[in-house]
Amino acid sequence: HIGELVDPVEAVQLTDLGATVMTVPVAAAVVGTGMTSGRAAMLVAGDHALRTGASAREQLADALERRRGRRGVETAREALPLLDHRHESPGETLTHDALRVRGWRLVPQVPVVVNGRARRIDLGVEGERVAIEYDGRLKYTSGAVLLEEKSREDDLREIGWQFVRVVSDDLDDPQQLDARVRAAGEGAGRGRGRDAEGPSGPAHSGPGAPWGRRADGRG
């Protein structure tokens, strides 16, 4: 509703279409998305804005403040501290949030050096060798990419990492996804003792419940 706008509106010419559209700042669009479409939409839009530099966290906070008291603003406000520029796709954002809600502490884009080669994991369970990888439809664009992905996983499995691969349908059943991560954590516990170079020592240590996995101690 134009009458409710609290940000400056800019006219942008789309020459290819022969049209003029009215736009608002990216931060306003992200917050508006959260207010109208909920937490998940806010996280996806916000992570993308932070990752690409289209907006800064401070700008998002300012956009929220200008909308204080409006319907949906508290939902958007609660999502703000959860935004993370390290998520590289909407699937990673949504996977992290689905498991966060169930008490898991995850670290995006975990660097691991194996046999002198730098590897990276979409999401790692804090303090444990459990890798959660989101496989989108466009992730494997060629046979060479698929072979490199297999080589990366083989390297990490050799040093005790357990993998949980996630596709979009898995997000519809968070209970089953939770069980798969729990099972991977148990497998990682059995495979400890092999060396790798991570961000905080051999197994990327960090605070947590048994095997550093649940914020609430459930499961």
Image (cartoon, grey):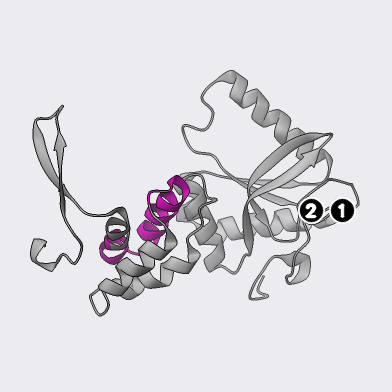
Q: Is residue 35 magenta?
A: yes
User: For the point 77% across and 64% down, which residue is it?
Assistant: 211
Q: Residue furthest bottom?
A: 69
- For disc 1, the neighbor class at 10 Å (few under 14, some 14 to 19, many from 20) is some
Q: Residue furthest right?
A: 193
Question: Circle 1 sits in a helix, a strand or a loop, which is it?
Answer: loop
| Label of residue 188 in the image | 2
For the C terminus, give its image quadrant: bottom right
160 left or right, relative to 216? right
Q: CA distance from mark 1 to mark 2?
A: 6 Å
In this view, 153 is above or below 59: above
Relative to the observer, which residue lies in front, 196 or 21?
21
Q: Position of residue 108 (x, y in %)?
A: 60, 52
- For disc 2, the neighbor class at 10 Å (few under 14, some 14 to 19, many from 20) is many
Residue 128 found in image quarter: bottom right
User: For the point 31% across and 74% down, which residue is it?
Assistant: 65
Q: Which residue is mark 1?
A: 192
Q: Which range of residues does the magenta coloring cover?
A: 32-54
Relative to the observer, which residue lies in front, 15 or 198?
15
Q: Assess whether mark 2 and mark 1 are in contact (beta carbons under 8 angstroms).
A: yes
Q: Position of residue 4 (x, y in %)?
A: 13, 68
For the N terminus, give its image quadrant: bottom left
Disc 2 residue type? Ala
User: For the point 88% across and 46% down, which residue is it?
Assistant: 195
Question: Circle 2 sits in a helix, a strand or a loop, which is it?
Answer: helix
What count of labels does the image hold? 2
Disc 1 residue type? Arg
| Label of residue 95 in the image | none
In this view, 154 is above or below 73: above
